[in-house]
Every structure is written in structure tokens, then in C-alpha cells.
Image (cartoon, rainbow, N blue to C red):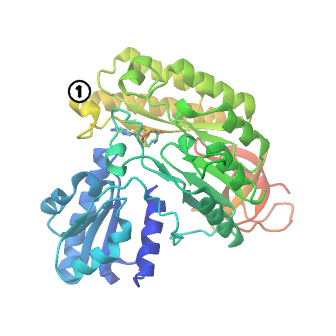
Amino acid sequence: MNFADSEVVAAILGEAGYGLCTEPSEADFVLINTCAIRDNAEQRVRHRVRELRALQARRPQLRVGILGCMAERLQSRLMAEEDNLSFVCGPDAYRRLPALLHQVREGMKSAEVELSTTETYADIEPVRMDSNGITAYISIMRGCQNYCSYCVVPYTRGRERSRDPQTIVNEARTLFGKGYREVTLLGQNVNSYQWSVASGQCPVGFPELMERVAEIDPRLRVRFATSHPKDLSDRLLEVMARHGNICRCIHLPVQSGSNRMLQLMNRKYTVEWYLDRVEAIRRYLPDCSITTDVIAGFSGETLEDHQATLDLFRRVRYDYAFMFKYSEREGTYASRHLPDDIADEEKTRRLNEIIALQGQIALENNRKEVGREYEVLVEGESHRSKERLFGRNSQNKVLVFDRVPSTGGAAAEPGTYRRVRVADCTAATLLGELSD
Ligand code: SAH
Ligand code: SF4
């Protein structure tokens, strides 16, 4: 989400005459886009800001500012605490950045942190940064009002609002025309995407939006993140099943395998509901991968609750998981009403247990892939060798393979689809060979 936002910021500042540079030592402004979801993300940002002091001493015109959720959460307090910062700008205020930078050049310090109920940056064509020219993100909505009790997002990104579907389809079509072959539609809870148009016309929900994007061209892959389990509908799964270019991968954050925890987290579903949704995914899309997010050591989590999470992982057998220790966030319901009462070492122990289990499951899942063949969108050179390329299959698994098939056929090129047979694997990667 931040990556997509930075591309919007680059477009707004590009319009105002600013250019991007690759080295901070050449910059007049360094803008750091930030996440406030966990304390360690914030600490890393503060470290980065402090590191820039040395460069500022050598380059007095250099101004440093913070964008995004930390700016929204801490506002001018952040400038008081980090005295080399000149400005903070929240996620709904990016259109004001040119004016803000102007003030900063005049020597002022400035904070723009007003949230909006309507801003979606729908008309802005993002400047693709660090792009491979093949895959891109498209933001389809902003904000969140689910108020999961642990989560700071509703406070830093404001009310949920959806972006005009026509602008989304246009953006995807433009990308396809430029040679991109995969778009990921982004929102905190894409399943609640809703665009109400003039009376007499049907409102557009996420399944309809997805269908419109998928119909641009069968060669354009469509992905999305994130799905809140409470809103994952059969209608969406039906649409996915009808379109082979909608990728077979659903990110379905569970957070905990214990109903008691889920209720305290205000997730609005039960383990039974979640498993029913997993079953529906497997029914409609038998080859779909499922990934998740989980939090270890939330308020009052007992060993039984933790075991319930491990049990759920064993039942669902996720292909990938983002696993976190609970980090209390100021202002949330949990910080006001639910004590952060699991000792840090115990959180770490539980987290490591989940990580170890998930590593084992991912490896076992991958071993079953050996011998299968997939259509892979080739993305680029593998990190290890120029002779090897990597790409992803529809399930979002990374496959690494030789650029030239051993049988001597045509070499693979980034941006094209090739068939790859899986020959071996690790927990994170499938190793294969071109088979077409
Ligand atoms: N909107 C998405 C999640 C966005 S935040 C959803 O609801 O699924 C990404 C992940 O960060 C969450 O799924 C959660 O697992 C984690 N997270 C959020 N707040 C957290 C906190 N206070 N401590 C630890 N992890 C947290
Ligand atoms: Fe946070 Fe919950 Fe919204 Fe996700 S759905 S962003 S976890 S409040």
C-alpha cells in the first residue's frame, strides 16, 4: 500500500516540477513513507531519519520529511522528537505536498495531516518507481473502518472509501498497453469495495470490479489483497473460477485460531466461519493457494489459545504466512481496554513456534509440487545468477529456472509467459526447468 502511495506522491511532485533521484546525497528532499502498524516498523523509520543527520550536515539544503501513517499518528510531535525533520504529511494530504515543500524551502516547518472521507487520488496516474515493467499495484480503495481492536489503521488512514471503477479499469488498461502483465488490486479489505453510481444503475462491488479488470485481456493477470474473511463471498469465488487470469491465490488473514481471541480482536468471524470460507475456496478453486497473517501473544492469549492457532495452521496448511508478535498501538481499543500482558520473551517463543510449524508446512506443500508444470510469468533475473530467471505461477509461488531450456529451445524473456516444470524445492522457492 505504501509502495503504491509513493508512486502517487511521485506523480504529484512530478507535476509540480520535482524529479526523482536515486542517491540521497543528490537530493534536496528526502521523503520517507512510513507504516505505523507495529512499533518496530516505527523504530526503523526513526533510525533512518537519524542516519540522515550526517548527510544534512554536509548538505545544508537537504530537508527530510515523513509521509504516511507515522505522520498521521504522531503529527507535529514527530518533528519535536526528531529535530532534523522539516515536515510531516499524512496519507490523505499528498495533493498539498507541492505547497508544503514550498513552505519548507522558505525555512518553515510544516504538518499536513487532515484526513478525508473522499480522497482516492483517482485521477492521478502513478509514476511507476523501481518498476520491472511487468507487475504493478493499483490502489482501489483507501482507509478502513473495521476497527480490529489491535489495529491502528482506522486512525491513520481514515474512513473507508472506494475509487471510481472506471479510473481503475483505465489504469489497468494503460498498464497492459505499456507491456505490464500483472496488476494487484489493493485495499485494506477489498471485499467491501463498493461504488454507488447514479440511480438506476447497479452499484459496483468487488466481484464486478474484478471481472471488469480481468476482461481487459486474458494475458493480464489480476491479483488482489487483502480479503477480510468476514466478507469473502461465494460470488467472488464464482467470478474467480470463471476467469483463468484471476490468480489462484487468496490472502486471508486469520490473526488467531481461537474464537475467544477473535472476539477480543473484534474480527467479526469465528474459526468455524473461517474454515467454511477455506472450504468454499477449495470447492470453487481447487488449485488456489491460501496465505495468511497471524498475531502471536495478543492480550490475554493463553497457551490453549496459542495451541488453537497452531491447530488451525495444521488444518489449513497455508502456502505462506506473515507472522507477527502483538505490538500495542496507542489509541486503539486494545491499548485502552485490553492489557498487553504477555511477556515479550513468551510472545517471541510463541511466534517462533508458529514460524517453525509454518516453515515445515510450506516445505511439505512445495514437495508436492515437484513434477507439476505451471504457466509462469517471467519477471527477471534470479538474485544468484544471470543465467537463471525467476517468475511466479498463478498461485504466487516463485519459480527459478535456467534462462535457456536444456533441450535447446528459445530462451525465456521477462514479461512473457512460459511453461516451467518443478524439479526441486525449498520452503520458499520452487526450482524448475522450462518445459515448453
Ligand atoms: N487489512 C488487513 C491487514 C492490514 S495490516 C486485514 O485486516 O487483513 C497487516 C497485518 O498486520 C494484519 O493482518 C495483522 O496481522 C498485523 N497487525 C496489525 N496490527 C498489529 C499489531 N498491533 N501488532 C501486531 N501485528 C499487527
Ligand atoms: Fe486493521 Fe482490521 Fe482494518 Fe485490517 S481490517 S486494516 S486489521 S482494522
For residue 177, which quarter of the picture?
A: bottom right
- Indicate left or right for 261 with 327 as reference: right
- Taking depth in this image into account, of 205 and 278 the one nearest to the observer is 205
Pointer 1: what residue? 337
At a point 66% along the width and 59% down the height, the residue shown is: 182
Is 351 left or right of 425, judged from the image as shown? left
Residue 226: image x %, image y %?
Answer: 53, 43
With 371 as the anchor, is 130 left or right in this view? Answer: left
267 up-or-down from 22: above or below: above
Above or below, 105 against 173 in this view is below
Task: Choose between 304 and 193: the one closer to the eye.
Answer: 193
Specify whether residue 417 is in view: yes
Q: Position of residue 410 (x, y in %)?
A: 84, 68
Q: Residue at x 58, y 33 (%)?
A: 318
The quarter of the displayed image where residue 67 is located: bottom left
- Rendered residue at 59%/36% (across/down): 362
The spot of residue 216 in percent (x, y) is: 74, 60
Q: Which quadrant of the figure shows ligand 2?
A: top left
Camera-side residue of 417 and 162 = 162
**Vertical comparison of 190 with 347: above or below:** below
Question: Which residue in the rendered view is the most extreme toward the top?
Answer: 304
Residue 253 in the image: state x and y as whole percent: 50, 35
Identify residue type, mark 1. His
